[in-house]
Image (spheres, rainbow, N blue to C red):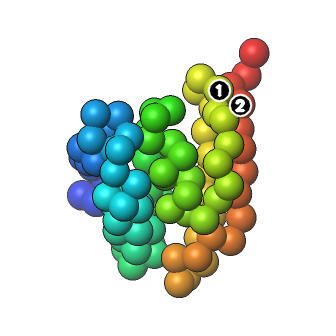
Amino acid sequence: MDSRLNSQTLAILNEDEGSDDPDGVAEAMDQLRERAVTDHVPIAVCGHRPVLPHMLNALDLPERALGTAECVVVHLTDTADVHAVEFHRPLA
């Protein structure tokens, strides 16, 4: 198993801390973007409705309502800019 595969909790991305701290959420998202590009690894990030607008804004994406279990796949360039975005809904 690849030793780079792990999970961690970023408190700033939970609704208790991140809902009212868009700058903190943006900083965390920027760090994740840089890590994905620097380490050449995909990163999955889970968030909840109160924090999602801040997360999308940090990726320079317009605010959008997301349904339960809907996900966003963001493809980055080698400079951590957003290249493409996919929105996926769960299968019925």
Q: Callout 1, which amino acid?
A: Gly
Q: Quadrant of the C terminus?
A: top right
**C-alpha gap between disc 2 and disc 1:** 8 Å
**Residue 79 coordinates in the image, percent (x, y):** 53, 84
Residue, far right? 92
* Residue 59 to residue 8: above or below: below
**Residue 23 coordinates in the image, percent (x, y):** 36, 61
* Residue picked out by circle 2: 89
* Residue picked out by circle 1: 67
* Front-most of residues 56 and 46: 56
Mark yes or no: residue 46 visible.
no
Q: Residue at x 71, y 31 (%)?
A: 89
* Front-most of residues 41 and 19: 19
Nearer the observer: mark 2 or 1; the answer is: 1
Residue, far front? 20
* Front-most of residues 42 and 2: 42
- Disc ID at residue 38: none
* Residue 31 to residue 92: above or below: below
* Residue 34 to residue 49: above or below: below
Residue, far bottom? 79
